[in-house]
Image: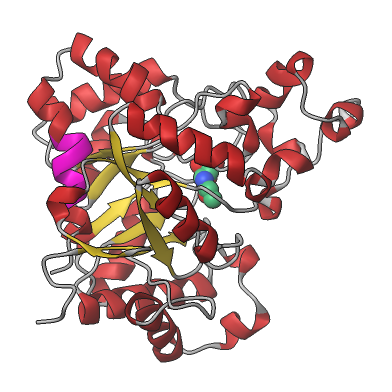
Amino acid sequence: MSERSGKVQTVLGLIEPDQLGRTMTHEHLTMTFECSHVPPAPGDEGLAAAPIEMKHLHWLQQNPYSHQENLLLNQEIEAVKEELLCYRKAGGGSIVENTTTGINRNLPVLRQLAKDTGVHVIAGAGYYVDVTHSDETRKMTVEKLTDIIVSEVLHGADGTEIRCGVIGEIGTSWPITESEKKVLRATAHAQTQLGCPVIIHPGRDTAAPGEVIRILQEAGGDISKTVMSHLDRTIYDRQELLEFAKMGSYLEYDLFGTELLNYPFNLRVDMPSDSQRVQNLVFLVREGYEDRILIAHDIHTKHRLTKYGGHGYSHILENIVPKMLSRGITQNQVDKILIENPKHWLTFK
Ligand SMILES: CCC(=O)NCCS(=O)(=O)O
């Protein structure tokens, strides 16, 4: 049995699972998202280059990936610190910080934020999507990738002694690339060695989550300890959702606060509203999946911070929980989704 067994690993060290409290399982506190820049529509170049101002807020909310500066969340450490203090006041306890190699993980900043705010921060090991893989990463064998991921959990990442407490978000595209498949296999092998939680960013296709789970399963991964993120924009048909749910992973709705008419990464997608997300939670609870649901905001751009007129990290606690209760989800079920499920997922075997 390792020293991590039965514990949760934060950027400040091991804690007891009961110390976590209410937990957002998919957020970012510092990262860059230039890899996903979307060129502005013809005529919008001026807006895309303008400083972020109130009068442009609606445009920014509808075109968040077409504004280069908006993609630099790493410039907002002070604002994020203020938000985390508000999150604590709103009853939040912990945040899983999903930034992995490729989108500028910064572990010293995460540790400082945890120290300054008292919020438990759990950092992510591994690699984001293929477009961010370096040539060196692409050439690595599954064994080498496994060793790196294991080392990020056991010894620390990015040349620091700060240890990751989950593997992910592991990035996958659609179709899944060869380099991503190697990272998925390495993730499963590392999980087998460590008994740790895993979290996946699926490609933007209904078939993507199931395909990822099959690859992890074949490589020996523990699907019951794996989270499938971004279901909001990936599986919309209820029957397909139930088929996927049967595969046994955690089911994460993590884009709360995002209300976007045209989803630029897949224009066929109708991004749900928060009300529709809550309807999906009600559906899954009624179908018996209350032990598998996780929720979060996945803040990854500036405009979603309250400093820029966004909803911030406390939106779920302040606005979504009352809505869940008003739609028939019980307080006990809310506590499962925000406290018990994250706790079980994050505890090392
Ligand atoms: C790094 C943050 C991230 O990948 N968020 C998911 C965005 S989306 O794929 O759901 O648009």
Report which quarter residue 276 is drawn in. top left
Q: Is residue 219 left or right of residue 201?
A: left
Report which quarter residue 129 is drawn in. bottom right
- In depth, the one of 320 and 8 nearer the eye is 8
Q: Is residue 111 left or right of residue 76?
A: left
Q: Residue at x 54, y 58 (%)?
A: 109
From what the image shows, is residue 297 above or below residue 224?
above
Q: Residue at x 76, y 41 (%)?
A: 69
Residue 260 drawn at (x, y percent): 57, 24
Q: Residue at x 19, y 30 (%)?
A: 284
Q: Residues in magenta?
A: 336-343
Residue 326 drawn at (x, y percent): 21, 9
Where, quadrant-wise, is the N terminus in this rendering? bottom left
Residue 231 drawn at (x, y percent): 37, 40
* Res 97 seen here: no
Q: Magenta stretch mostly in which secondary structure?
A: helix
